[in-house]
Image (cartoon, grey):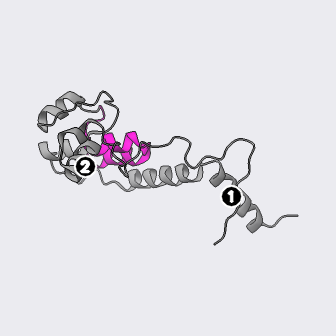
Amino acid sequence: MATVAELKAVLKDTLEKRGVLGHLKARIRAEVFNALNDESEPRPPLSHENLLINELIREYLEFNKYKYTASVLISESGQPVVPLDRQFLIRELNAFEESKDNTIPLLYGILAHFLHGTKEDLQNPFSRGSSLQPPNPDLGRQPSGRRQRDVTT
């Protein structure tokens, strides 16, 4: 019969392989934060600048599938639950977007501008051998039918 420690290890390993453990930990952190959040202490008013910054961060978090982190940002900062209109954000930042792919967060374009400094780089922040790459939805997943090998160095 398996010991409690062995069962625990197998359960942890299984949850990690399925990609569930990280989500569970993030969800628990969010729930603990909600439980500890003192509603009696008023939050400072959300300034216009913080509203814009938070929206850039939210767009980045959601693009990269950091949904629990985004939910904590929204609840902790007082950011509106409904995202700001992207065109409104572009106008407020005096930015421009020539890329046809408007799914890439504006934060990537801003970063590309400061890294490369040219208007052309804002068209596609993932071009020119940039270290910024669109997220791979299969990253971290095991190919079906294959088991992960432990590699030690």
Do labels 2 and 1 touch, CB within 8 Å? no
User: Front-most of 135 and 28?
Assistant: 135
Q: How many marks?
A: 2
Range drawn in magenta:
55-82
Circle 2 residue = 111
* Mark toward the start of the polypeptide (2 vs 1): 1
Residue 58 lies in magenta, yes or no?
yes
Q: Label 1's element?
A: helix
* Mark 2 Cα shell of 10 Å, populated few (<14), some (14-19), many (≥20): some
Indicate the amino acid at tag 2. Answer: Leu
Residue 72, visible in the rendered structure: yes
User: Which quadrant does the C terminus fall into?
Assistant: bottom right
Labelled disc at residue 84? none
Nearer to us in this view, 118 or 147: 118
Position of residue 22 measured from the top left corner of the image (x, y, whole percent): 54, 53
Which quarter of the figure has residue 8? bottom right
Q: Nearer the viewer, mark 2 or mark 1?
A: 2
Q: Looking at the picture, how far across and down is residue 145, in whole percent?
A: 75, 43
Observer-nearest residue: 85 or 144? 144
Q: Which residue is the site of mark 1? A: 13
- Point out the residue furthest to the right here: 1
Mark 1 burial class by Cα count in 10 Å: few <14, some 14-19, many 20+: few
